[in-house]
Image: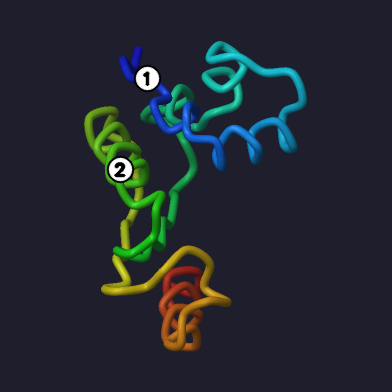
């Protein structure tokens, strides 16, 4: 089992998002719905594309570490300097071609 706390949930902006997405919530609900707590070796192959300027970057790194420890098949592609959401990144087309290449092998 993963040991971590949702420290970002104490941030006012994050709390507003969590309230909107989950309604009434607590840390157990976040754990129940988080892929971090569902890591296992027999997951289908995962492609993670992450911008290094995204506020979620640390969480993706932690998730990739859990996948590696479990022996799950995954690939993490880091987009240097990219913010959250490919629609916000000027190099979006490159990210799309990366994911297309992954899917087509």
Q: Residue at x 50, y 80 (%)?
A: 96
Q: Nearer the viewer, residue 71 or 51?
A: 51
Under tag 2, what secondary structure?
helix
Q: Are marks 1 and 2 in contact (CB under 8 Å)?
A: no
Q: Position of residue 30 (x, y in %)?
A: 56, 22
Q: In the drawing, what numbered circle is on residue 62?
A: none
The mark nearer the N terminus, 1 or 2, is 1
Residue 77 quadrant: bottom left
Q: Residue furthest front?
A: 12
Of the 4 image quadrants, the one containing the C terminus is bottom left
Q: Position of residue 88 (x, y in %)?
A: 53, 76
Tell me if 22 is positioned left or right of 3 in this view. right
Residue carrying label 2: 64
Under tag 1, what secondary structure?
loop
Q: Position of residue 44 (x, y in %)?
A: 49, 43
Of the 4 image quadrants, the one containing the N terminus is top left
- Crowd around label 1: few <14 · some 14–19 · many ≥20 (10 Å): few
Q: Residue at x 29, y 37 (%)?
A: 62
- Crowd around label 2: few <14 · some 14–19 · many ≥20 (10 Å): many
Residue carrying label 1: 5
- Of circles 1 and 2, the one toward us is 1
Tell me if 73 is positioned left or right of 25 in this view. left
Q: Residue at x 41, y 56 (%)?
A: 48
Q: Residue at x 43, y 29 (%)?
A: 36
Query: Is residue 7 shown above or below 100?
Result: above
Query: Is residue 51 shown above or below 92?
Result: above
Residue 80 quadrant: bottom left
What separation in Å lies between label 1 and label 2 (alpha carbons)? Answer: 17 Å
Query: Is residue 45 shown above or below 39?
Result: below
| Total numbered badges shown on the rendered structure | 2
Query: Is residue 66 shown above or below 52?
Result: above
């Amino acid at each position: 089992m993963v040991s971590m706390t949702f420290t970002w949930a104490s941030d006012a902006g994050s709390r507003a998002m969590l309230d909107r997405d989950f309604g009434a919530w607590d840390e157990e609900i976040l754990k129940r719905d988080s892929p971090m707590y569902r890591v296992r070796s027999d997951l289908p192959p995962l492609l993670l594309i992450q911008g290094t300027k995204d506020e979620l970057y640390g969480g993706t790194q932690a998730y990739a570490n859990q996948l590696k420890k479990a022996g799950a098949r995954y690939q993490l592609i880091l987009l240097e300097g990219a913010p959250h959401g490919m629609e916000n990144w000027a190099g979006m087309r490159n990210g799309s071609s990366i994911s297309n290449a992954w899917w087509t092998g």
